[in-house]
Amino acid sequence: MIKRTLAVLTAFMLMLTAFTACTPEETEEIVTEDVTTELTVATEDTTETLPTEEAVTELTAPTELPTHAEAEISEVAYNPTECSVIYEAEDGETGGYTAVMSSHEGYSGTGYVTGLSLPDSTLKVVLDIPSAQHYNVTVCLSSDEPVEGVLYVDGLARGTFTTSGSGDFESIKFENIYLSPETSSVTISDLSGEVDLDFFLLENTDDLSELDYSVSGVLSNSGATEATVELYKYLCEMYGESVLTAQQCSQGSNAEIYAVAAVTGKYPLIRLGELSGYSAGVDTGDIELAIEYYEDGGIIGYSWYWAMNGSCYLEESGFSLSNAVTTHDVAHMSLEKVEELLGTGGVSEECYAIIEGIDLIAEQFSRLAELDIPVIFRPLPEAGNGEFWWGEDLDSYIWLYELIYTRLTDYHMLDNIIWVWNAQDVEWYVGDEYCDIISLDVYDFSLGAWDNQSHVTALIRMMELTTDKPIAISECNILPSPANLKKDNAYWLFASVFSGSYAITEDYELCTDYMTEQEWILFYNCSETITK
């Protein structure tokens, strides 16, 4: 487990105060379209130190922005046609040490192909594509131990898989792949062990062009300010029409959005900040930057990777959320009253620390409320992934999320918040009454032949969770390509690259480790996205 070290900057100190910010477990996995109820998140294996105060405060907005022609993304052909065809592996084009065998029971056809894990061994199966539409491609294979691999369609990776290792033939489905006539080729590669491949099944999917993006546009907080209501109404009107550009920023810095603008010529519509410094009692100066961005025509938001004892991680923080849970109505109590309960043993030290942290965040959001500035708020990111202290167990997490919501809304009377639930496991959903937006974090570190996928299958899974909340990509390292967004009708509310080395280099220039400069430019200069 690798930590990201975030530098927390203050306007009144000449020293740098370091805080540990948190990202998901670094597993070198790829988030694919093959998503069920739990979504996997991967992060880069890197320890990142963000700029010192002196370095960041010297950064200024680019004085001249480049101009790029807006790309009009062309319409996509759809011709829904029924299709369900099995293509036997033994009928494909084999090479190297592959062989057709029939000793393993349970196969279809006349046999199966083995030896694919050996050097220079290949298998290509050609599929007949009857019409332009989305398809599911199912691969049937077996292995005697868990084996990882990648499905390639027409030379592009479409998803990863892991076999169960049961020894029996099993089917693994890759959903919603757009294909057009007349043929496509499929292969599996990058195998970590030996498999026997039986067949590929090609089936048509539901018509993705008919996805329903209509939502009510009613906030969970009935007492929300007029400005907050109007902003949410705008977000809901744009949902399904265009993808809003967004960018996560390092605390107390606009380095990422300056780098984006210097290359693309456009600023993201949404500036996303981080609250971990504020909840530790340090003034990072980020609220001032957010106010300035809003007054200049942008939208602002915050995530909260909440550090306890210097870390967000469950094991490193040593913080027990379950010890904090209480039946006392601490959401509506003053901090002094909670302290009295602590003194008598009515609540734990963990409970008091939580109330204290929420109140520190409330101070900052109150500054925005006084200026009638609405804010998009993503507390307790990546619910249910098991890494962070707020994910110790489901019941404690639900208690904490509802506590944050109730204390900020009822006790502090902050009616300028648009609430985001950040999902990685749908079983941890807090319910429509406690959020306004659902978001996912989606990373890809393959650096291989992928094509900036739209992740439409993950979007559909979240649509099945609730029909009344817009859904966004809150973190990624690779933005979906505009062509894929349109082709798959995958109109996320917004999509944001994460901060630090995901977006900028050590010299504060735009990072091109995961996307080319041209891909950055296209995303910010096309008909499918909206900038500031």
Image: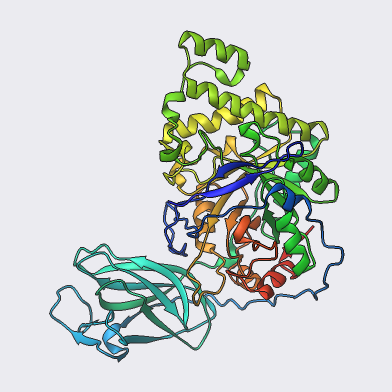
Q: Which residue is rendered at x = 14% and y = 74% of the image?
A: 105
Q: Which colour scheme is used?
A: rainbow
Q: Nearer the viewer, residue 214 or 178?
A: 178
Q: Quadrant of residue 90?
A: bottom left
Q: Residue furthest top?
A: 344
Q: Quadrant of residue 114?
A: bottom left
Number of numbered markers:
0
* Residue 364 image point, x, y percent: 72, 33
Q: Nearer the viewer, residue 207 or 248?
A: 248
Q: In this view, does 263 lie above or below 330?
A: below
Q: Nearer the viewer, residue 19 or 328?
A: 19
* Residue 145 image point, x, y percent: 22, 65
Q: Is residue 530 visible?
A: no
Q: Is residue 360 left or right of residue 194?
A: right
Q: In this view, does 404 lie above or below 171?
A: above
Q: Is residue 307 left or right of residue 191?
A: right
* Residue 198 image point, x, y percent: 26, 78
Q: Residue furthest left?
A: 103
* Residue 263 image point, x, y percent: 75, 69
Q: Which residue is rendered at x = 66% and y = 59% of the image?
A: 240
Q: Which quadrant does the C terminus fall into?
A: bottom right
Q: Is residue 333 above or below residue 518?
A: above
Q: Residue furthest front?
A: 14
Q: Is residue 188 left or right of residue 351?
A: left
Q: Can residue 130 be seen in this view?
A: yes
